[in-house]
Amino acid sequence: MIQVKENNTVKVHYTGKLSDGQIFDSSEGKEPLEFTLGQGRLIPGFEKGLIDMKLNEKKTITVSKEEGYGEPREELIQEVQKSQLPPDMAPEVGMGLISKTEDGQEMNLVIVEVKEETIIIDGNHPLAGKELVFDLEVVDIKE
């Protein structure tokens, strides 16, 4: 029977959960996720968990923070003057912002604190520092 190997293109149904069971993402009710292993599009632990799975096999994997989104990085948390925001913006904790780097890349930020004159923004991935659990089902394998 065919098994998932590096460089295979696979279709996978998945449900991603935090270690407390809270679901953060799922393909349930949608098309399965299709991707080619080894291209670095997904976190390493997700791809490693699929290796050697068979067609229609289901399993649950646990992905360490090192194999997921890594540890939160202090340098991605910054204090910014409110005067640098658009004048019509009312910043709130949890609000998402998009910033462009000098080379034109977009960076997703979240406001984590609002002070009198400044806000604290966090550019870490929301799942950084967290252990992740995925329920996986392989629905197609192309070599």
Image (cartoon, rainbow, N blue to C red):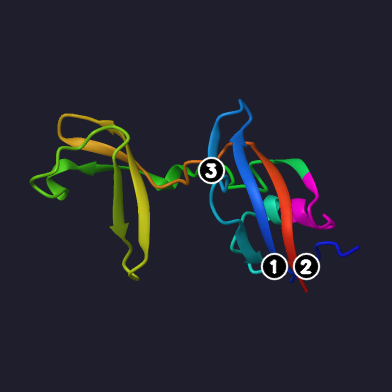
How busy is the neighbourhood of tag 3: few (under 14 within 10 Å), some, or many (20 plus)?
A: few
The answer to whether residue 53 is magenta is: yes
Tell me the SS state at disc 2: loop
Which residue is label 2 attached to?
6
Q: Which residues are magenta?
A: 48-58
Residue at 73%, 62% in the rendered image: 140
Residue at 21%, 30% in the rendered image: 115
The answer to whether residue 100 is magenta is: no
* Residue 87 in the image, given as x and y percentages of width and height: 8, 47
Query: Number of marks in the image?
Result: 3
* Residue 100 in the image, given as x and y percentages of width and height: 30, 62
Q: Earlier in the sequence, mark 2 or mark 1?
A: 2
Spot the residue most to the bottom. Answer: 143
State left or right for residue 123 relative to residue 29. Answer: left
Q: Amino acid at mark 2?
A: Glu
Which residue is label 3 attached to?
25
Nearer to us in this view, 33 or 112: 33
Say whether marks 2 and 1 touch (CB < 8 Å).
yes
Q: Amino acid at mark 1?
A: Gly
Q: Amino acid at mark 3?
A: Asp
Say whether marks 3 and 1 touch (CB < 8 Å).
no
Spot the residue most to the right. Answer: 1
Residue at 64%, 47% in the rendered image: 14
Res. 38 mark: 1
Look at the picture and state if 107 lies above or below 143: above
Mark 3 or 1, which is nearer the eye? 3
Tell me the SS state at disc 3: strand
* Residue 25 in the image, given as x and y percentages of width and height: 53, 43
